[in-house]
Image (spheres, rainbow, N blue to C red):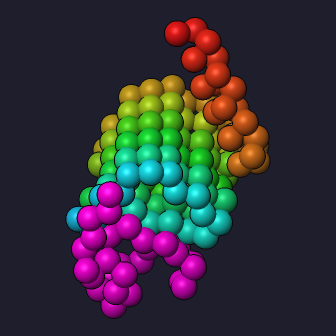
Amino acid sequence: MIKSNKYMLNPKSKTEDTGLQSGKTSMIGTGTVIQGEIVSQSDIRIDGKLIGNVKCSSKVVVGAQGEIEGNIVAQQCDITGKVTGNINVKDILNLRSNALIKGDIVAGKISMEPTVQFNGKCSMQAGTVSQVVEMLAEKDERKAAAE
């Protein structure tokens, strides 16, 4: 199910710096709700709502109005919005003002502003995105076996 905002892909409607590579960014705009998994090799910006997982070999940005109910696996990640799920980042995870995180974090480096709300476990370890994906799969298998 996709609910779309007709202005979500209009590049002139955004004037703020997104921190993403120009021309190589997939965007989910405010007011848009997507259910399912997103897999991308280019940058992703989420200002709407995603119910599902994100696997990105580049950068994921969750804007102030953005919300993800699912796991994130990425090279880099900047979060200002809400994430309910585990976050696995190879390089750097930036948790910006008023971000709300409910889930575990594995990242090479973490930057967190004082107004961030974080409830979960945090582990700092560098690894490739594929290693992080394998680690998540093993964790899910152990969880399923325990149930």
Along the horizontal axis of the image, is 136 left or right of 5?
Answer: right
Relative to 50, 141 lies left or right: right
Magenta: main secondary structure equals loop
Lateral position of residue 15 relative to residue 106, left or right: left
The x, y position of residue 98, in whole percent, is: 29, 49
Which residue lies at the image location 54% right of the left edge and 85% below the top edge?
A: 23
The magenta segment is 1-29
Q: Is residue 49 visible?
A: yes
Q: Residue furthest top?
A: 146
Q: Is residue 12 magenta?
A: yes
* Quadrant occupied by the N terminus: bottom left
Residue 26 part of the magenta segment: yes
Q: Is residue 140 left or right of residue 17?
A: right
**Residue, x 37% and y 47% (percent of image)?**
51
Q: Position of residue 71 (x, y in %)?
A: 50, 41
Q: Nearer the viewer, residue 127 or 85?
A: 85
| Residue for point 60% across, 63% down | 40
Is residue 80 placed above or below 127 in the rendered structure?
A: below
- Report the residue that reaches farthest toward the front: 1
Residue 62: x %, y % from top left: 40, 58
Above or below, 45 against 119 in this view is below
Q: Quadrant of residue 5?
A: bottom left
Estimate the x, y position of residue 139 in percent, counting from the top left: 63, 24
Q: Nearer the viewer, residue 91 or 143?
A: 143
The quarter of the picture where residue 14 lies is bottom left
Q: Residue furthest bottom?
A: 12
Q: Residue at x 55, y 30 (%)?
A: 122
